[in-house]
Image: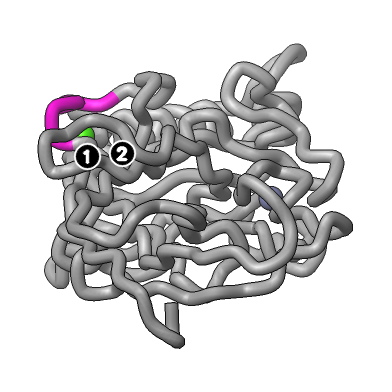
Amino acid sequence: MNLCKGISLRNRGFDGVIDIGAFERGSKGGSMSPLILVLILAFAVSVTYAQSGLPDLIVDSSRLQSSIFLKTEIIRSSGCAYAEGCVAGTGKRKLLKFDTAIANIGTADVVLGNPASHPELYEWSACHGHYHLKAATIYELLSLDMTTVVAGRKNAFCFLDGSRYDPNAGPSSGYNCSNQGITSGWQDVYFHSLDCQWIDVTGVPTGNYILKVTVNQNGLIGESNYSNNSAFANVKIAQGKKN
Ligand SMILES: [Ca+2]
Ligand SMILES: [Zn+2]
């Protein structure tokens, strides 16, 4: 989930979080009753079963294509969109907006856990007051010959289960902002209405372009397939009052 609206972690709720740390602490040291041992073994087996195979992240290209539109907005220097580099300047900006749906089509969940415990995966955003996932998506605008028009910009994400991508997927494992991940068969959707869910195309000449959205470009999240991590969509940038 994109947190660029300034939603704090407190507001996201912590329901459904399993405190693995407490469990591990409780299981260490001293003598162990047979019942506890059986419970631990059962837990370990269920975790192994749930995590067999690997995740496989994709960006839903049909959703990307169908959601694209242009909108002019006033960007203020005091806002996080400017501080986080989501625009190239302040004032009137022409923004190419779209939905990004990241789906896990692999056989295992993406399991990231608590951002505070994983500095290798997350960086702190002072403006937003929460963690940003480094393995975020990259948004690029390309010309029809695939050369870069607007350089790639990372967008920050809080990976969680938004909705089923595969209608036959099992239940959600309950990932949220404090225990992040995406269940096998589920997707995390970033709606076009969210802050920074755009490319700043101010000053880009009218014409036809290609929007490229890539997830996990740096490979920080282990996957079974990295060749399907980009989605492409056709974009027409035109003049007009609405643009
Ligand atoms: Ca993939
Ligand atoms: Zn943020």
**Can residue 221 be seen in the rendering of this structure?**
yes
Q: Nearer the viewer, residue 212 or 143?
A: 143
Q: Which residue is mark 2?
A: 214
Label 2 and label 1: CA atoms lie apart by 4 Å
**Can residue 18 be seen in the rendering of this structure?**
no
Assign ligand 1 to one image quadrant: top left
Chief SS of the magenta region = loop
Q: Nearer the viewer, residue 167 or 211?
A: 211
- Snapshot quadrant of residue 218: top left
Q: Residue at x 46, y 44 (%)?
A: 181
- Snapshot quadrant of residue 145: top left
Disc 2 packing (10 Å; few <14; some 14–19; many ≥20):
many
Q: Are marks 2 and 1 in contact (CB under 8 Å)?
A: yes
Residue 10, percent across and down? Answer: 81, 62
User: Who comes first in sequence, dot 2 or dot 1?
Assistant: 2
Q: Is residue 80 left or right of residue 223?
A: right
Q: Which residues are magenta?
A: 223-228
Q: Nearer the viewer, residue 96 or 38?
A: 96
What is the three-letter code of the residue carrying label 2? Answer: Thr
Q: Which residue is mark 1?
A: 230
Q: Residue at x 22, y 59 (%)?
A: 207
| Magenta span contains residue 38 | no
Q: Residue at x 84, y 47 (%)?
A: 127
Residue 65, percent across and down? Answer: 20, 66
Q: Residue at x 41, y 63 (%)?
A: 96
What is the three-letter code of the residue carrying label 1? Answer: Ser
Q: Nearer the viewer, residue 133 or 12?
A: 133
Q: How many numbered dots are placed on residues in this image?
A: 2
Name the secondary structure under disc 2: strand
